[in-house]
Each structure stands twice: as structure tokens, then as C-alpha cells.
Amino acid sequence: MSNTVLAQNVMGRITHGLIGLDLFLQEKKDNEYLHDFLSLTASEMNDALTTASVRKLVPNTHKISPGESADLTTQVLQTQVIIRKIDKADPKELELAVKNLKKAMRLFYEFYRR
């Protein structure tokens, strides 16, 4: 998979996580968006965040520090843990999952916008 496609794929699956959580909160049932988000791996996130040629998606980007990449990956993986047990998650956990994914989207785009 090309680096540009990988980055787009990762951002798309994070977006699917947000859509899936929204649908779950409205309908209280599992959905394909959540399954798509759960297929995202730490390796894919790391590759998308650290590959130099991916940064060409948006001009004037900066190199992502290993700490920033690790924090973002950790937040997404924590959210996946919550979603895997979504039927038993309490509202505070679901709120944290939404917050983590929104933050991940903001940070991911910020990395490519700088």
C-alpha cells in the first residue's frame, strides 16, 4: 500500500470509529463502522505517522516526534479496548472513547497541516 493511501486509510478508519460510536449511542447496536475502526493496527498508525513521504499530503508539514506518535497510537488503542466491550461500557468510558477519537483526528490532521 502506498504511503499516501495508508495515511488516508488510517484517517478514514479513525473517522469510522467516530461515526460508529455516534450510531451506537443513537441506536444501541453494533455496526460496521466500529468493526472497520477495530481493524486499525498500531503498526499501520505508526507507519502513517512516521513515513516521510506521507507528509507530502499537505505542504509545510513537520516531522512527528516519536512521543507524539506513541501518544496518539496509545489513545486509539485504548479506544479500541472500550469499543470491544461497548455493550458493557459505562457512559464515562464511551465519552472517553469519543474524546480520544476526536483528539486523534485533530492531532492527525494537525501533524499534516503544519
Image: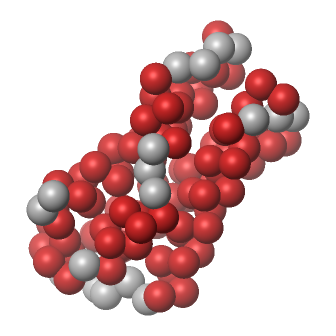
Q: Position of residue 10 (x, y in %)?
A: 35, 53
> Would residue 114 appear left or right of 56 to someone viewing this image?
right
* x and y, in percent, of residue 79 in the image: 65, 50
96 or 76: nearer the eye? 76
Residue 111 occupies which quadrant of the picture?
bottom left
Q: Is residue 46 above or below residue 17?
A: below
Q: Is 44 located above or below residue 97 in the figure?
A: below
Quadrant assignment, res 77: bottom right
Query: Does residue 58 lie above or below 40 as drawn?
Result: below
20 left or right, relative to 89: left
Front-lying residue, 61 or 40: 40
Say which quadrant the C terminus sits in. Answer: bottom left
- Image point (14%, 77%), residue name: 53
Q: How many marks?
A: 0
Question: Is residue 77 shown to the viewer in this render?
Answer: yes
Colour scheme of the rendered structure = secondary structure
Residue drawn at x 24%, y 52% as measured from the top left: 8
45 relative position to 28: left or right: left
Residue situated furthest top in the rendering:
27
Residue 42, compared with residue 86, is above or below; it is below
Report the residue at 52% width, 37% height from top.
18
Q: Taking the image as drawn, is residue 61 in sight?
A: no
Q: Quadrant of the N terminus?
A: bottom left
| Position in image of residue 61 (x %, y %) | 24, 79
Please tell me which residue is depicted at 62% across the width and 47% down the height of the picture: 80
Occupied quadrant, residue 45: bottom left
